[in-house]
Every structure is written in C-alpha cells, then in structure tokens.
Image: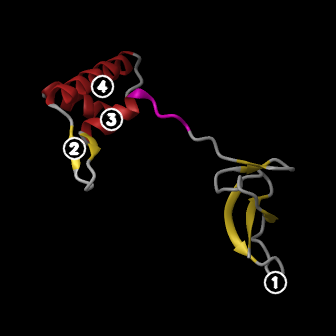
Amino acid sequence: MARYALIITATGAVDNVIEYDGSAPFTPPTGQELREADNNAEPGGTWNGSAFVRAVVPTPTRTQVLMGEVTNPVASYDDEGEPVNKTDDVVAAEKLELKNLLLAELQAGDLSQERTQTLLRLERE
C-alpha cells in the first residue's frame, strides 16, 4: 500500500491522504484528483502542479500564549507525569502582562468577546 493524496482540482488543496494499492478500482469524488503522495502531502497543504507543499503553521502571538497560560498555570510535569504548578509570582506576572496586552487591543478597538471577558475577569482579580 502506498500513500495517495486526494486533491481538490480547482484549488490544489490537499483534502485527505489515504492508503491505496494503486490498482484496485477507485474513483475520486467529483472535483478531486488522486496523486501519489510524498512526505510533504498532508490535509491542509497544497499541490502546486509539481510538488506537495506543507500547510503553514502559524506561530501563536504572545497574547494567545498567555490566554492559555492563565487558564492552565502548570509550569511543567515531573517524571511521573504529575503537574508542577507555577509560583504565585510567575502567575501574577503573566496575568499582568496579559492584562496590559488586552488593554492595548481594547484601545485599538480590536478586542474579541472572549478576550473582553478575560480582561474583565483579570480586572476583578
């Protein structure tokens, strides 16, 4: 069995990657084509006509990282897989940094509902 990519013909977007023997009867869905895949073929990636191109993985912003950090204050995990919590000072510093970043977004008029709720929660603490 080999890996094959189902490609949306109109856009070149890789819709799925499947295992296929290459000889059994198989008709791709309408609007898709089948190509033998290499290691770069993955859903979300593209076929540019001659090669597969991996999807771009965006780097999270500091605000996005801190939004996750304030809801999960675990610094790391020990050898047994148990969480090692952050110190109160580290948690307080992250909350202050996040609050300042959210206030800057608010002043720019670009604050989502989720971030507004987080800002209000941080203001009450």
Q: N-terminal of the two: label 4 or label 1?
A: 1
Q: Are marks 4 and 3 in contact (CB under 8 Å)?
A: yes
Q: Are marks 2 and 3 in contact (CB under 8 Å)?
A: no
27, 49: nearer the viewer: 49
Q: N-terminal of the two: label 4 or label 3?
A: 3
Q: Quadrant of the C terminus?
A: top left
Magenta residue check for 66: no
Q: Which mark is residue 92?
A: none
> What's the distance in space between the residues labelled 3 and 1, CA to CA?
49 Å
Circle 3 residue: 67
Circle 2 residue: 84
77, 2: nearer the viewer: 77
Query: Which marked residue is nearer to the observer: mark 2 or mark 1?
Result: 2
> What's the distance in space between the residues labelled 4 and 2, CA to CA?
21 Å
Q: Are marks 2 and 1 in contact (CB under 8 Å)?
A: no
Q: Position of residue 109 (x, y in %)?
A: 40, 20
Q: N-terminal of the two: label 3 or label 1?
A: 1
Q: Position of residue 88 (x, y in %)?
A: 14, 30
Q: Which mark is residue 25?
A: 1
Circle 4 residue: 98
The three-letter code of the residue at mark 3 reads Met
Q: Quadrant of residue 5?
A: bottom right
The three-letter code of the residue at mark 1 reads Pro
Q: Position of residue 100 (x, y in %)?
A: 30, 18
Q: Quadrant of residue 6?
A: bottom right
